[in-house]
Amino acid sequence: MPADQLIAEARAAWLRRETEPAVSLALTAHAQGDPDGLALACSIALRGYRADLLVEHRAEITEMPTGVLRDGVLAVLQIADTDLDGAMARVAAICPGSGADATSDPLGGEGRLLPLLLAYLATGAAASAAWVHARSCIDAARGAIAAIPEEAAGGRGDSVAVHIPFDLLGLDALVELHTDSGTEARRALTDALAPLRMRNSLTADHALALICLGSVEHADGRLGEAAINLARGARLAPSWRPGVRVHGHVELAFVRIRQGRWRDAAEVVRRTDAPAESVEYDWLESQALAVHGLLLALQGDLEASGPVLERADRLCRDTPVFLAQMVLTHARIMVAITRSDWRELRRALDDAAEPGYRQPYRHEEWWMLTLLAAWHLERIDEFRSGVAEWGREKGAEASAYYWAYVSILAEYDERHPEAATAVSRALSRLSLDDDPLGRAWVRIVAGIYYSRFGTRGRPDPVRALAVYEEASAELTELGAAGLAARYDEVVAETTAELLRDAGGANPVARLTDQQRKVALAVGQGYTSGEIAGILHVSKRTVDYHVANIMRRLGVSSRREIARVLVVAP
């Protein structure tokens, strides 16, 4: 095929956004001696975020004239080599010459490349938590856009791609959050997306902006809003921006984990893989591995999670990725708690408290983890001062975690009436907004207290068993197999104690109200699935209740449950 026809075919393929065929055709034209072939290949590769297609032509590109095509491709390849500083320096050197952008670019009619390149570098800098670099790129991109003549910017010939201003809004809000520089950028981002959302006009052009907004909301503890925006952004991300999609999926999975929706998180993780052909592979692979390893660890499979998390950690050492590091920190903390390795928990918390590192926990969650480590390390003075300091803060009394620690301290000091009151307050303040693992922990604290002292200074195994079972049921429903197994042992021990103490008492009195409802339905012959529909709970929860009912009644089958109900209705 003649070179001029190859060039025409390359342009046609690009119009269909078929990046790889378009670049291949342009390179074939270049090989046949067409003077525009290499420049066209560079322009298409940059606009399609596929500079990896030009790796084998790096030397030839280096011989091109200095400008956005040559230095843009070389900068992106430097990012692939994890040389962010070098890429930044290269692009900074061509910024003053941005006016020549359109004349040297065969696709200049589709918008200037320099703002796109700067926005891409800002994205890489933000992913690496290089906030100063990100801010520099955002400002430079906006400067390049502002430098476009008014008469040209109004038409298609010399403007910027539609997604670039939205990318910059999103990145600006992200940098603002992590540099504690106000909320103006966040408001601008929200205001820009709101009318599009109302008109149902959000498109692929808004994908990164939505994901950035979701990231900001996640950091603020607004998990519901974060999940909505991350899911929509990942869904809208175009195939030619795989990094945007993967980042959105990883952070969405992390948010789902923190919401206690582990099955939803697992479904997202199954769809998350880093494309091997992308120049961003090393940046994306660590994120995908980190969230996969975290999920395995939470599900109790520490043996399988270990190598996955270690590989993600190794990748992060070579290519620091902020989101992957945040997920790895959470995994490290959860593994330490599962293993009761309190020194490792303390080390993980100390690392996460380093200046400039923004951990994902709400203020009360951070207090909860910090005091958990202090208590188990027997640093009583530190624990006591921490509880007192937290209590002086606004909003502390609304936290179930705070009252759980007040009860622990009061019990330690043998102030049992205060401890009983604090336990009651802790349980009453639990809500669906709390982390499900945190809810289970509060119930375990309450169960331990009731098993020792009850509410009147005497052990109350019935009440202790009720809260233990609630904790174990929630962990089982969640899929936290390791922690659920541990608490099942506590339930079994407390049940045995209850049966010993009950003597000839009515066995039905050993059941909670919810267990009585389940037992009655079992006695009437309903299946677990049917009972789940009647009581508006999951089948798994019903099965768990049935197992606990059999333990409490000292029977081994559903038929025996029915027999006990007949004898002692």
Image (tube, rainbow, N blue to C red):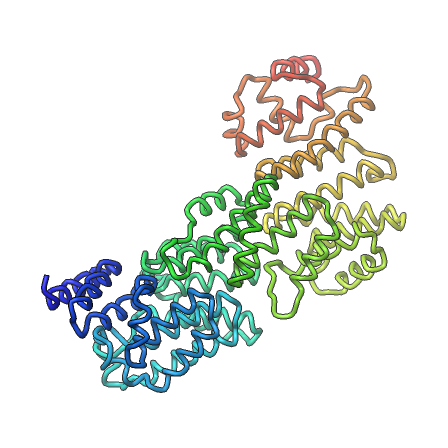
Above or below — where is 181 with respect to 410? below
Q: Quadrant of residue 70?
A: bottom left
Residue sitting nearer the eye, 507 or 10:
10
Res. 192 in view = no
Nearest the viewer among 444 and 425 is: 444
Q: Position of residue 554 (x, y in %)?
A: 72, 19
Using residue 120 as the reference point, say whether residue 331 is left or right of it: right
Q: Is residue 41 left or right of residue 355?
A: left
Residue 153, how many percent across, how many down? 26, 81
Q: Residue at x 63, y 52 (%)?
A: 332
User: How many discs mark residues in the rendered view?
Assistant: 0
Give x and y (percent) for residue 317: 56, 61
Q: Position of residue 430 (x, y in %)?
A: 66, 48
Residue 551 is at least partly visible in this image: yes
Looking at the rendered image, the quarter that the C terminus falls into is top right
Instruction: From the viewer's perspective, tell me whether residue 273 is left or right of residue 7.
Output: right
Q: Quadrant of residue 495?
A: top right
Q: Quadrant of the N terminus?
A: bottom left
Q: Is residue 564 left or right of residue 308?
A: right
**Residue nearer the viewer, 36 or 518:** 36
Residue at 68% across, 50% down: 429
Q: Residue furthest right?
A: 414
Q: Classify 379 as above or below 445.
A: below
